[in-house]
Image: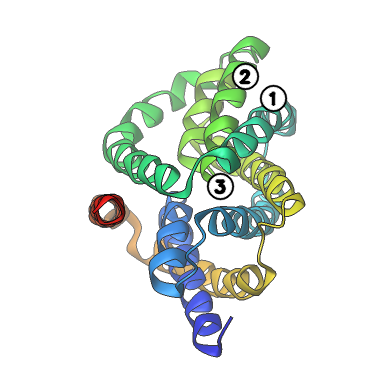
Amino acid sequence: MTELQIALSVASGAVVGFALGLLGGGGSILAVPLLLYVVGIHDAHVVIGSTAMAVAVNAYFNLLPHARAGHVRWKPGIWFAVFGVVGAAIGSRIGQLVPSKDILFLFASFMLFMAYRMVKGRSSSESSETSGTKQRLRLGRLGSSGVAVGLLSGFFGIGGGFLIVPGLVFSAGLSMVEAVGTSLFSVGTFGLTTAVSYSLSGLVDWGIVVPFILGGAVGGLLGVRSAVRLGKQKQSLRYVFSGVIVVVAVYMLVMNLHALYGHIA
């Protein structure tokens, strides 16, 4: 790692942290392309392993204020995480076996799906808030949702907050604010599971993780402050952020196809 790459890692972490603090989720999906194309780490598996560790630390850090505010429902949160850890462990092992070019293509495709969910999926989750708190905890739903989200989180090395939140609303009947706070426990646990799996294979670069976490902490604080000031404009910003994700995903797909056809040629 050069000094420039360390500085770029801090800046990239700040961008991701700011997006997470401002929008409450989705920012971690930018970590992989930032580390690949901005910081210049060319091993996709090292990027995914390192991203998972950084996401885990930031998630546990942000869990504390939510817990103090009473937004965390520990029973469904722990059960969701327990089931999800199984999925994350399996997903991370599968991800390590997939060639870098293939996993980047799948990741870019997943980014397009997440951009769509950020725009369209929010309203459906919010509509469940009023009736959701009356539902009982259903371990069947909780288990299937946890394993499915854990698989995706482990495979791609992301926090998966935008999947965990609706998963908790659907399976445990939590309100949106409870689901957001509770989801951070699962985000951290899934990320840690993935990071440990990659670390055992030597695929976590601490020279990336530490400056990325530091930048993310600063960016997160700024994002939270901006969220308070912007208020109702956050939904418009969500559309803008979804557009950014689409652009980055298309860029990744183009780069991936260029590398593929260039290699064949």
Marks 2/1: CA–CA distance: 8 Å
Instruction: Check disc 3 and give the amino acid type.
Output: Gly
Contact? badges 2 and 1 (CB < 8 Å) = yes
Q: Position of residue 91 (x, y in %)?
A: 60, 33
Q: Position of residue 71 (x, y in %)?
A: 63, 42
Q: Nearer the viewer, residue 131 or 211?
A: 211
Q: Is residue 225 left or right of residue 253?
A: right
> Does 68 sit above or below residue 11?
above
Q: Is residue 238 visible?
A: no
Quarter holding the C terminus? Answer: bottom left
Residue 101 bears which disc, if any?
Answer: none
Report which residue position mark 1 lands on: 83
- Secondary structure at numbered mark 3: loop
Contact? badges 1 and 3 (CB < 8 Å) = no
Q: Is residue 124 left or right of residue 54?
A: left
Q: Which sits earlier in the primary sequence, circle 1 or circle 3?
A: 1
Q: Is residue 88 visible?
A: yes
Report which residue position mark 3 lands on: 157
Marks 1/3: CA–CA distance: 17 Å
Q: Nearer the viewer, mark 3 or mark 2?
A: 3
What residue lies at 56% left-to-right and 86% top-to-bottom?
Answer: 2
What residue lies at 56% left-to-right and 27% top-to-bottom?
Answer: 168
Quarter holding the N terminus? Answer: bottom right
Q: Nearer the viewer, residue 137 or 199?
A: 199
Instruction: Check disc 1 and give the amino acid type.
Output: Phe
Q: Tell me the quarter of the picture where residue 54 sits.
A: bottom right
Q: Which sits earlier in the primary sequence, circle 3 or circle 2?
A: 2
Report which residue position mark 2 lands on: 142
Q: Is residue 77 left or right of residue 41?
A: right
Q: Nearer the viewer, mark 2 or mark 1?
A: 1
The residue at the far front in this view is: 265
